[in-house]
Image (cartoon, rainbow, N blue to C red):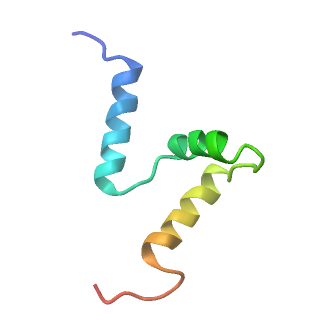
Amino acid sequence: MRMLSKGFWTGMREAIGVIAGVPSYERYLAHMAACHPDQPPQSRAAFFAARQRDRYGRGKGRCC
């Protein structure tokens, strides 16, 4: 059986994340380095917490 490359699994993880609506931390880091080099990027945990708040509201309940 042929072993799949690390790049394949990275691509699969990225694709599944896009389908599930999970933002890419690596893409965020690249954006911060290119567009905001004077600002420190958020930690991975802070980044995902902020994306969750943006997606589901800031403590507001949803009916659906």
- Point out the image quarter for the N terminus: top left
Q: Is residue 46 left or right of residue 9?
A: right
Which of the two residues, 50 or 38, is positioned nearer the viewer here? Answer: 38
Q: Is residue 7 left or right of residue 45?
A: left
Residue 41 in the image, given as x and y percentages of width and height: 69, 49
- At 28% from the left and 51% from the top, the residue drawn is 19
- Point out the image quarter for the C terminus: bottom left
- At 44% from the left and 70% from the top, the residue drawn is 55
Q: Residue furthest right?
A: 38
- At 64% from the left and 59% from the top, the residue drawn is 46
- At 63% from the left and 45% from the top, the residue drawn is 35
Q: Residue furthest front?
A: 35
Count of picture labels: 0
Q: Residue furthest left?
A: 1
Which of the two residues, 52 or 30, is positioned nearer the viewer here? Answer: 30
Compared with residue 20, is residue 57 higher up or lower down, i.e. above or below?
below
Query: Looking at the rendering, which quadrant does residue 31 occupy?
Result: top right
Residue 27 in the image, given as x and y percentages of width and height: 51, 42
Which of the two residues, 36 or 42, is positioned nearer the viewer here? Answer: 36
Which of the two residues, 2 or 47, is positioned nearer the viewer here? Answer: 47
Compared with residue 48, is residue 58 higher up or lower down, i.e. above or below?
below
Residue 13 in the image, given as x and y percentages of width and height: 37, 38
Compared with residue 60, is residue 23 higher up or lower down, i.e. above or below?
above
